[in-house]
Image (spheres, coloured by chain):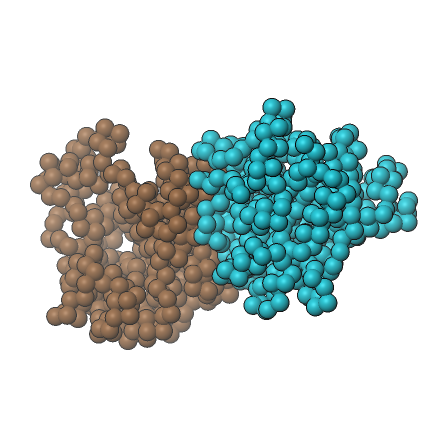
Chain colours: A brown, B cyan
Amino acid sequence: MKAVGLVAEYNPLHNGHLYHLKMAKQITKADVTVAVMSGNFTQRAEPTILDKWQRTKEALSVGVDLVVELPMQYAVQPAHLFASGALSLLDSLQIDDFVFGAEHPDWDFNSLVQAENKFESTDFSKYNATYATAFNNQLIEHTGISLTEPNDILAFGYTKAKLKSKLSVNLHPVKRVGSAYHDEKIDDTSSISSASAIRKAVKNGSAGFESLVPEQTAVDLKELKDVNDWNDLYPLLRYQLIQAPLNYLAQTYQMSEGLEHRLKQAAQRASDFDAFMRLAKSKRYTYSRIQRVCLYALLQISDEQMQIKNKQLYLRILGFNHLGQEYLHQIKKTVKIPIITKVDQKSRDGQLQLDYRAGKLYEQLSGVEQDMRRRPIIV
Amino acid sequence: MKAVGLVAEYNPLHNGHLYHLKMAKQITKADVTVAVMSGNFTQRAEPTILDKWQRTKEALSVGVDLVVELPMQYAVQPAHLFASGALSLLDSLQIDDFVFGAEHPDWDFNSLVQAENKFESTDFSKYNATYATAFNNQLIEHTGISLTEPNDILAFGYTKAKLKSKLSVNLHPVKRVGSAYHDEKIDDTSSISSASAIRKAVKNGSAGFESLVPEQTAVDLKELKDVNDWNDLYPLLRYQLIQAPLNYLAQTYQMSEGLEHRLKQAAQRASDFDAFMRLAKSKRYTYSRIQRVCLYALLQISDEQMQIKNKQLYLRILGFNHLGQEYLHQIKKTVKIPIITKVDQKSRDGQLQLDYRAGKLYEQLSGVEQDMRRRPIIV
């Protein structure tokens, strides 16, 4: 069986994702579709609008054959780490082709990646700018192209990861359709809107999002009582930043340059998340970067722990249909990393610890246990 | 000026405390009354029904002249440590007399304390019982008396602390009147009920508590929107017990004998505090002991930090009237420990760190800042 891979957050799964899935099958003529999906937190470190099981069910309902969880240690990361983690997982799944959206699918991403070899090394303290800006200044200088849109940045990351690890998978960037990633307004003239526009409509109780999502998503979103976001996590974050000693916070993954002082002071003063972010934000760090560090601090993930976890790949199966099952059976004997279908006490405290803890944090918002006693969804 | 000292939680201040205050003045003929009061958490590690500033105002309104905060590191402790911390503070305040309630004021507490010298050393693992039980078995053997009621236990603690530190303060146990400490029902035939009965009535919105408390307390209790308890702290406790590594939890003050494993497992399973306590409780530990360890874990107080803090006494002034001010002025030059009337950044991060953090935790329930920019109440 020939497999095509997808990487998605499905937050929530909408018509744009349907188009992506259709294109993937059409371009590659694959027999089976495998999606690597973020768990309960997005790349920007936000809790997903629906949990990973609901989103798996939605994916299976539209014809994805196998859904695998992108572990927390890759899912909540800057684009290049997200991309290389996701691609490693697809490679372990022995897929032939990988189809992903890009704002500029026609760009020669191989050349862009190779241009990086000519860059001067970036001195953060000298530039006093975010890495993205410093990187782009050099990219423009060497190629005339600026990498600013989120899916282009991921496409660059996938290409770079493929070249670096010399993977055989074929990369197929396809044009993203419909609204831009960050658009917060629903486009009335299209059946495709951005995920953030849909989330906003759901949060505000606005009508109109039903026609933008497949049936299962519409059902799930209509049943949703509350759209959880960082405002709901803030009491826990505030608690932790105030009570934990500075030297403990300083060990947090990506807590660099004394950022723990800034975050502690902001938490001591701010009683809501927006006020906190206004105090915490600086020119040096993007909003996403701060939000990710906050999630790492909440999950008490140390730098050391993240380095260890990053070396331990595994395939956490969230759901499949008969085709997905057949494919799993086909690759099972040659897959080099553990395939996990249930969480026991050992994996909870070991391999899956970060996913488990991220799931427990999510459970504090949703009330629904995410890992223990949960089995893959089979349709 | 001759001063009499009191030690109280005033949770809330009720008619029983008025009687105590009246007796203290009557017995000692003191010119000035000094109360050492717990801050925002009680000895049993529960958040107080009203904050320390409201309770200070109430104390001043009924004729206490000076209110000093019993630091968190003494206030939330087993009886013997609570008693010795409170007595040290009263001694620093140079009081002549100390009046406290006891269920059995006629007992010869000096002899009870001296009997302890004859005890065999207690082997916990052998007895597999709480310390209190083991202690009482020996006390009965040597004196025929069993120390089971909370104020008798404190009276024993004060006496022991006085003898140990050879303090000159005169101890005056007085009979507690009205309902017993643990009574949860209001006694309709008396103007005195226990603090816990009053708190319960307030929580349930029952009428009838107004006649059991002085006017200022009644005003404060009627304005209270919510009676905060461990159910409100549980999301934070659950978060911390799940997310913090076992070796970090193990460093918590009084987290002994691998209790961190038991608490983590209970938190992973229990979605509310009652369910948590049912899972956490064992024969070895009293309910209060578990609750205190939970508060220490929440405040992330290590054993090491507590040992350091216990050596640093200070007088945190919460409020006074003109007599209290005069008395402070009189003793100021000879007081051997720092007198603190406002919290600055240095004391926030140093000396007062535990009180500050306990205040921030309380603020997460009440919404009211407890230390920064707060000044003593002057009436």
- Give left or right: position of A354 versus A149: right
Q: Quadrant of the C terminus of chain A?
A: bottom left
With respect to residue A342, does A143 lie above or below? above
Camera-nearest residue between B68 and A116: B68
With respect to residue A220, does B172 lie above or below? above
Camera-nearest residue between B191 and A21: B191
Task: Determine the image quadrant of residue A376.
Answer: bottom left
- Give left or right: position of A9 versus A310: left
- Give left or right: position of A326 versus B194: left
Measured as percent of width and height from the top left, residue A98 is found at: 24, 57
Task: Determine the image quadrant of residue B154.
Answer: top right
Q: Identify which residue is drawn at 53% across, 47% down.
A: B53
Can you name the residue that lies furthest to the top here? B333
Camera-nearest residue between A210 and B176: B176
Q: Identify which residue is drawn at 37% across, 66% down.
A: A226
Measured as percent of width and height from the top left, residue A146 is found at: 13, 44
Camera-nearest residue between B254 and A102: B254
Residue A2 visible in image: no
Measured as percent of width and height from the top left, residue A361 is found at: 45, 56
Task: Determine the image quadrant of residue B334.
Answer: top right
Measured as percent of width and height from the top left, residue A203 is found at: 30, 65
Q: Identify which residue is drawn at 50% across, 56% down.
A: B235
